[in-house]
């Protein structure tokens, strides 16, 4: 996107990519239908970027979700809004958009160089790249670093850029998993029987988090190692902070969000002491069956099932203890990165004039739902325009000269 914005202004652009082909993580997003952005009102959209919305607000306002949909439309890619408000291409594929986009970039004269891995700056301040066993150097007028986070390293975003930037004195917030699963200590029986089973029609919150008093509704999946899914991703930053502070987090689950506590208490009390089994009482009182019923038994002491008041309270607020996020390499996205105070309003690194940062390598995070790609596109657009403005204001160079890649 930085190359798109810069080339549209007439700047000469070269893209260096460490991988054999372009846009591998973008294509991976396409396997899930390519959730480009979200259709909710902009104030609510911006609120998804907790902790960094103040810095991202002007960037996303300058390149809002409507602009991203219009951009896709320039390539004949029609988009639609799903039932959850998420925006997708009509054909639910990333490849057609990427293919047509690359054609336009090449038509503008953008040069793409694959298998060029950036190593940092040399003593003279030039960029260094590894390619085909050689070290190449380049001194451009402006540089945009869009090196990704640290998740899915097999696609290129391996976080190797942290060392050279830190060595340059640029503050880096440690890379951490975001939009990830969390680990729970399931019993062997529960793991074997229910791993891969979704929990639907539930609500959840992170216990002790006063900033989100109301549980969030959604669904997630029981995994071999714990929990994962859209509802967990929405709470990931809170759960991660709790684990950092306390060594564990408590996921409070409401297994019957459509019923009040009092209603569940009354329904359980009616069946108490009769001929109904506990399983039948749970089904009749709150629709608790299958994995929900098993999760109650996994978490609660056996004696809890003899007390309707205790059981009702657990149905409405079941404490599931989580002890760690899943590894960074498995995460959908990355928290941490270049501290936002290190860049100006155009995303230029204050300590490295002429160097801009964009995308996931900046220290922001958001849940899934189109917010990740939207912010990457918005930051890329801002950095690309600013880099082009800097390059175009520089003394005129020989337009026929190719990039100076000196071994």
Image (cartoon, rainbow, N blue to C red):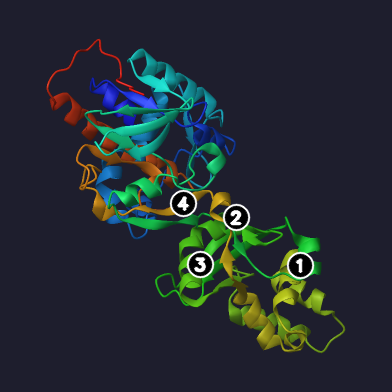
Q: What residue would you read off at disc 4?
A: 334
| Spatial CA span between label 4 and label 2 | 16 Å
Read off the residue under disc 3.
239
Q: Is residue 103 above or below residue 59?
A: above
Camera-nearest residue between 249 and 339: 339
Tell me whether the residue at label 1 lies in contact with that at label 2, contact meaning CB atoms closer than 8 angstroms: no
Whether pointer 4 and pointer 2 mark residues with C-beta atoms closer than 8 Å, the reply is: no
> Are the residues tagged 3 and 1 within 8 Å (C-beta)?
no
Q: Secondary structure at mark 4?
A: strand
Relative to 401, say whether 385 is above or below. Answer: below
Residue 59 screen position, x and y as percent: 27, 43
Q: Residue at x 72, y 59 (%)?
A: 224
**Distance in Å between CA atoms under marks 3 and 2:** 14 Å
What is the x, y in percent for residue 14?
Answer: 34, 23
Q: CA distance from mark 4 to mark 3?
A: 15 Å
Residue under pointer 1: 289
């Amino acid at each position: 996107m930085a190359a798109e914005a810069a080339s549209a202004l007439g700047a000469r652009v070269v893209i260096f990519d460490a991988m054999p082909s372009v846009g591998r993580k973008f294509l991976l997003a396409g396997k899930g239908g390519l959730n480009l952005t979200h259709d909710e009102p902009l104030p609510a959209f911006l609120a998804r970027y907790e902790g960094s919305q103040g810095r991202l607000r002007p960037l996303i306002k300058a390149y809002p979700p409507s602009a991203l949909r219009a951009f896709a439309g320039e390539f004949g890619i029609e988009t639609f809004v799903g039932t959850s408000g998420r925006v997708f291409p009509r054909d639910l594929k990333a490849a057609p958009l990427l293919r047509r986009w690359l054609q336009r970039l090449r038509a503008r004269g953008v040069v793409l160089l694959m298998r060029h891995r950036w190593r940092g700056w040399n003593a003279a301040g030039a960029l260094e790249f590894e390619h085909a066993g050689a070290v190449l150097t380049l001194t451009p007028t402006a540089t945009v670093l869009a090196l990704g986070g640290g998740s899915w390293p097999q696609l290129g975003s391996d976080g190797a850029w942290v060392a050279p930037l830190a060595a340059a004195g640029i503050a880096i917030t440690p890379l951490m998993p975001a939009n990830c699963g969390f680990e729970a200590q399931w019993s062997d029986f529960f793991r074997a029987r229910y791993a891969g089973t979704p929990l639907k029609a539930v609500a959840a919150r992170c216990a002790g988090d006063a900033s989100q008093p109301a549980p969030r509704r959604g669904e997630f999946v029981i995994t071999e190692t714990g929990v994962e899914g859209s509802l967990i991703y929405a709470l990931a930053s809170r759960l991660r902070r709790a684990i950092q502070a306390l060594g564990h987090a408590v996921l409070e689950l409401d297994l019957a969000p459509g019923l009040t506590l009092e209603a569940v208490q009354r329904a359980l009390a009616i069946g108490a002491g009769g001929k109904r089994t506990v399983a039948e009482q749970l089904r009749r009182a709150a629709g608790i069956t299958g994995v929900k019923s098993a999760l109650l038994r996994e978490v609660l002491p056996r004696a809890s099932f003899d007390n309707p008041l205790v059981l009702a309270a657990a149905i409405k607020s079941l404490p599931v203890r989580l002890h760690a996020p899943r590894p960074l390499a498995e995460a959908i996205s990355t928290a941490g990165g270049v501290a936002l105070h290190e860049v100006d309003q155009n995303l230029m690194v204050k300590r490295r004039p002429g160097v801009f940062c964009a995308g996931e390598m900046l220290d922001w995070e958001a849940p899934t739902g189109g917010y990740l790609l939207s912010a990457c596109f918005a930051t890329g657009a801002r950095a690309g325009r600013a880099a082009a403005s800097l390059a175009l204001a520089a003394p005129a160079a020989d337009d026929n000269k190719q990039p100076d890649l000196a071994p």
